[in-house]
Amino acid sequence: MEDRLKIKVIPKASRNRVLIKEGRVVVYVTAPPEKGKANREVLKLLKRLTGVGVEIVSGEKAREKVIKFPLEKDEFIRRIEGNG
């Protein structure tokens, strides 16, 4: 089973965290949006919170991204909420 999810990324935040706002996943990372640093931090943070590998499918250079992961979307979000 593989699913996808649209997320919003906020680079250069005061701390790394993931919030669910109005049903949307918003990922805050301290890394700047240069040379893929923020993207790497997003993937690392989501993997730590969910326990599964995450891949960016689209939006590599945008704040709005689509990610994919080997879980159902509801389970992925439950894991974020449980560890966030």
Image (tube, grey):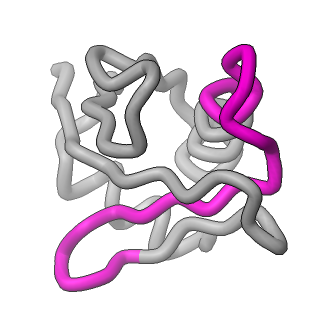
Q: Quadrant of residue 17?
A: bottom right
* 30 within the magenta span: yes
Residue drawn where x is 76% and y is 26% of the image: 37
In percent of width and height, residue 8 lies at 37, 54
* 5 within the magenta span: no
Which region is colored magenta?
A: 20-40
Residue drawn where x is 21% and y is 41% of the image: 5
Residue drawn where x is 18% and y is 31% of the image: 4
In this picture, is 9 found above or below 1?
below
In percent of width and height, residue 45 lies at 68, 45
Asked if residue 28 lies left or right of residue 67, the reply is right
Asked if residue 81 lies left or right of residue 17, the reply is left
In this picture, is 73 found above or below 39?
below
In percent of width and height, residue 72 lies at 19, 40
In percent of width and height, residue 40 lies at 69, 25
Residue drawn where x is 61% and y is 39% of the image: 42
Quadrant where the N terminus sits is top left
